[in-house]
Amino acid sequence: MKRLSSRFLLLLAPLLSLVAAPAHAQDQGMVSPEALRNNSGLAVPRFASLKADRANLRAGPGTDYPARATFVRAGIPLEVLKEWNVWRQVRDAEGETGWVDRAMLSTERSFQVTGAVRTLRARPDLSAPAVWRAEPGVVGRIVTCAEAWCRIEVDGRSGWILREHGFGTYPGEAVGG
């Protein structure tokens, strides 16, 4: 009986290593030590922002992969979907996905206005006075988010915007203080 259980464990060991590996590694069949090295330990998915003024969005996790696009604006929010060594698979507000080096990202949270011109309000209430209007693509620093609203700051101006009117947070996620 002891011999049978040893064989069973030998057969089961590779399966156990898949269960123990992070979900992003399993999805890509990446359970090698190389894939797990430099793992941030942060939740995936999560939001980050682009730290660099210019960053290539690559087809895969490495400089050998072609650039599919180039981000040319620091501060834009990016959703981190997966991690592979120093590379992070991200999605932007338009839904474009690709890989960037972690050095290009910041943990500072930002919000990008989407869809149409949006009204920012003095308080998190649709009946509150309008303080300014923001065009699609405007990016601001998130001051705080609670329930359906986020307070963002852009060039010294701040106001409350409905969370659903932009990209950079998850529904109901508390952000900031």
Image (tube, rainbow, N blue to C red):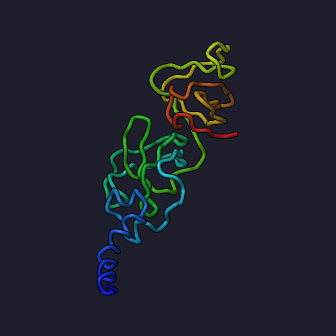
Give the image location of residue 174, x and y in percent.
62, 38
- Left or right of 121 on screen, residue 66: left
Is the residue 110 above or below the residue 28 in the image? Answer: above
Q: Residue at x 67, y 15 (%)?
A: 128
Q: Nearer the viewer, residue 26 or 159?
A: 26
Q: Can residue 62 be seen by looking at this rendering?
A: no
Q: Can residue 13 be seen by looking at this rendering?
A: yes
Give the image location of residue 116, x and y in percent.
47, 20
Q: Residue at x 59, y 25 (%)?
A: 161
User: In which quadrant is the N terminus drawn?
Assistant: bottom left
Is the residue 59 above or below the residue 134 in the image? Answer: below
Is the residue 137 above or below the residue 9 in the image? Answer: above
Count the labels in the image: 0
Q: Nearer the viewer, residue 124 or 23?
A: 23
Quarter of the image holding residue 30? bottom left
Give the image location of residue 34, x and y in percent.
40, 70
Q: Residue at x 47, y 44 (%)?
A: 79
User: In which quadrant is the C terminus drawn?
Assistant: top right
Is the residue 28 above or below the residue 75 in the image? Answer: below
Q: Residue at x 51, y 40 (%)?
A: 77
Residue at the farthest bottom position? 3
- Left or right of 53 on screen, residue 156: right
Give the image location of residue 162, x and y in percent.
56, 25
- Left or right of 176 on screen, residue 100: left
Q: Nearer the viewer, residue 111 or 74?
A: 111
